Image (cartoon, rainbow, N blue to C red):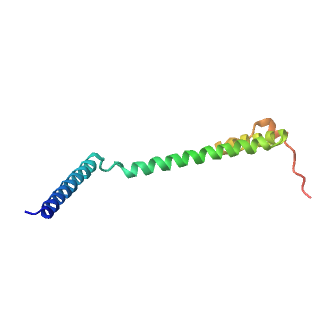
Amino acid sequence: MNRASKTSTLVKGVLLVIIVSVSFVNTAEAQKRKRGSKKNPQKEAMKKQDQREKDTERAEEKGKKRHLKLQERAVRKRMKQSRKQARRYDQGKRAPFFKRLFRRKKIRR
């Protein structure tokens, strides 16, 4: 055999070894990775939706507090009274006897 054929055979052998070793490394890496890292995509979606709802509720509460804080003292008092009255109406209770007895009469024009 001449020298050129020996080197080409050697180069081919080295390339073959490199290709085979690279393919083994790739398959080993593929086996190490977990399959289906998201076990239950529906559960993940539910968690995200719950988190969004909680964030929305927090933002709403924060907005209500800020709105109340911006009002004057007299306005806050009226708001509190109307809130109590609304709760009473929701429960189906009438106004106390003395309030019904001494309330202002409506003037008709």
For the point 73% across and 43% down, the residue is 66
Q: Residue furthest toward the left?
A: 1
Q: Quadrant of the C terminus?
A: bottom right
Residue 92 vs residue 24, the one in the foreground: 24
Please report the residue visible at 70 percent of the width from the left and 44 percent of the height from the top.
64
Of residues 80 and 71, the one drawn nearer to the viewer in this rendering: 71
Q: Is residue 80 above or below residue 44?
A: above
Most distant residue in the right direction: 109
Q: Where on the picture, by quarter, is residue 80?
A: top right
Q: Decide which of 57, 109 is in the foreground and name it.
A: 57
Q: Residue at x 15, y 64 (%)?
A: 4
Count of labels in the image: 0
Identify whether 2 is placed above or below 36: below
- Quadrant where the N terminus is found in the figure: bottom left
Residue 27: x and y, percent?
Answer: 23, 51
* Residue 24: % across, % down: 21, 51
Of 22 and 79, which appears nearest the observer? 22
Relative image position of residue 71 (x, y in whole percent): 80, 43
Residue 89: quadrant of the picture: top right
Residue 78: percent from left, percent from top: 80, 42
Q: Quadrant of residue 15?
A: bottom left
Asked if residue 35 is positioned above or below residue 102 in the image, the reply reads below
On screen, residue 108 versus residue 63, left or right, reads: right
